[in-house]
Image: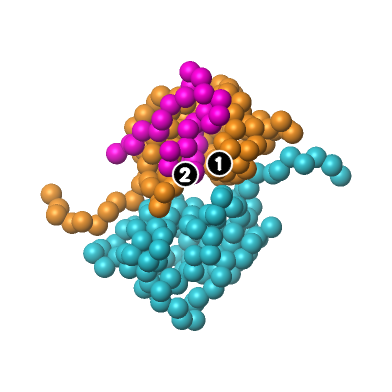
Chain colours: A orange, B cyan
Amino acid sequence: MSGSAVPAAVNIAAKLSQFSELWSQKTVAVLNDYEVKLAKLKGEFVWHTHEDTDELFLVISGRLTIQLREGDVVLEPGELFVVPRGVEHCPVADEETAILLFEPSGTINTGDAGGSMTKAAETLN
Amino acid sequence: MSGSAVPAAVNIAAKLSQFSELWSQKTVAVLNDYEVKLAKLKGEFVWHTHEDTDELFLVISGRLTIQLREGDVVLEPGELFVVPRGVEHCPVADEETAILLFEPSGTINTGDAGGSMTKAAETLN
């Protein structure tokens, strides 16, 4: 109804309610050449490395374990962790877990590993 | 006690409990040449512009109004907004509000405006 050009805030919970697919990254905001993405996880991903970028995980709900070769980092809601570039990691979630990711646009979810879980991020409007 | 080199997660609430100063950005994580910062706000900031970068605000608690010349964007907890580069803005919070910021390292809080509220981010260990 309004012709206002004032942009809207992004409500994380509302965005999460728009999809149920697991292991599928949804872009909800863009900052310079970086993207804020949401994803729902359950089970174990694949071990992989991003050689060119760090990767930020912030847990919204559930519980995420980021397996590193040196040990596990466990993230509860409201906790974040940056996996440094070049560090092999494998996310795993025993229960369905919602996360926010922050990383450069075009970062591939499976990094150097490839395989059947490789999937480009989709924009969620 | 442990010699483990496994790095720890960043708990946002715990980090927020470590400081009470208003309008002072605390760096809690670094991602490539970007920083995750926390801040506590109350009252009105200064109108300013970042000519070289977008700036992400995510509200953790309280309520933030980002005044733009074209209107207000109101952020509740769990909501985020990206102020595009070159867009003049002025944050204001009626109650004490905790936010997470994401932007390039070295971004000055007051942008082009300068003045007495200008302050470099400090690393929060």
Residue placed at 14% from the left, 54% from the top?
Answer: A3
Question: How many numbered tags mark residues here?
Answer: 2
- Residue B5 drawn at (x, y percent): 77, 41
- Residue B46 drawn at (x, y percent): 40, 74
Q: Quadrant of the C terminus of chain A?
A: top left
Question: Which residues make up the magenta segment?
Answer: A98-125
- Residue A37 drawn at (x, y percent): 43, 39
Q: Chain of mark 1?
A: A
Q: Is B102 placed above or below B88 here?
A: above
Do the residues at pointers 2 and 1 share their chain?
A: yes
Quadrant of residue B47 within the rendered picture: bottom left
Q: Give the mark toward the camera: 2 or 1.
A: 1
Q: Which residue is mark 1?
A: A52
Q: Is A16 placed above or below B58 here?
A: above
Q: Which residue is mark 2?
A: A104
Residue type at the position of mark 1: Asp
Relative side of A94 to A69, left or right: left
Q: Is B33 placed above or below A54 here?
A: below
Q: Dominant secondary structure of the magenta stretch?
A: loop
Residue placed at 49% from the left, 65% from the top?
Answer: B107
Residue A116 magenta-highlighted: yes
